[in-house]
Amino acid sequence: DASATPVLVRDLLRLRRSLMAEILSMITGRLGPDATSMARKMARESWEQRTTTARYATADLDVLRSLVSSAKCLPALWMLNQMSGIYSDLAKSLGTTLAPPESYVAAWDGVLEALDQRDHDTALARLNQYLEGHDERLMALLELIQ
């Protein structure tokens, strides 16, 4: 049912934001010394994959996955690994609609800068600001193609 698609996508995006926020809360004080430099590298690699939806979706999750690995937070890593299949399926069904906005790398840089300073509140605010903008844009595009 095509009318159910926007509701499903909106719910998945909301759950993704909640999960990412909770993971960020868990790992902020546990990151290793090179964690944010690796995540920055992963964000740039993700950006390079943005025209290939399935590769971008995997690379996008790898940014957070690299932070979680550095923090040695196995439950969060397990959750992200489980989520990757759902995220990949969503990416395939949405195609180029999922492409990130131009602010993608700058948004991650802002989150990672705050994490470098162990400023959880700012990191979370920046992540939420980016995800909310991205999700609003995605939902608007989805409604146009429905």
Image (cartoon, rainbow, N blue to C red):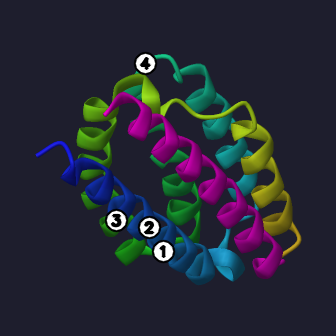
Find the residue positioned furthest to the top.
51
In 3D space, how far apart are the residues under numbered discs 3 and 4 (Cα atoms)? 24 Å
Q: Label 2 belongs to which residue?
A: 14
Quarter of the rendering containing residue 7: bottom left
Q: Looking at this view, is 121 or 143 the one in front?
A: 143
Disc 2 or disc 1, which is closer to the eye? Answer: 2
Q: Label 3 belongs to which residue?
A: 11
Disc 1 or disc 3, which is closer to the eye? Answer: 3
In 3D space, how far apart are the residues under numbered discs 1 and 3 (Cα atoms)? 11 Å
Q: Are marks 1 and 3 in contact (CB under 8 Å)?
A: no
Q: Are marks 1 and 4 in contact (CB under 8 Å)?
A: no
Q: Residue at x 68, y 77 (%)?
A: 28
Expressed as whole percent of the image width and height from the top left, the position of residue 119 reads 84, 77
Q: Label 4 belongs to which residue?
A: 52
Quarter of the rendering containing residue 44: top right
Residue kind at label 4, given as amino acid type: Thr
Q: Label 1 belongs to which residue?
A: 18
In 3D space, how far apart are the residues under numbered discs 1 and 4 (Cα atoms)? 26 Å
In 3D space, how far apart are the residues under numbered discs 4 and 2 (Cα atoms)? 24 Å
Q: Are marks 2 and 1 in contact (CB under 8 Å)?
A: yes
Q: Indicate left or right for 39 with 6 as reference.
A: right
Expressed as whole percent of the image width and height from the top left, the position of residue 126 reads 76, 63
Magenta residues? 119-146
Label 1: state its secondary structure: helix
Q: Indicate left or right for 131 with 75 as reference.
A: right
Q: Are marks 4 and 2 in contact (CB under 8 Å)?
A: no
* Of pointers 1 and 3, the one earlier in the residue sequence: 3
Q: Looking at this view, is 4 or 61 the one in front?
A: 4
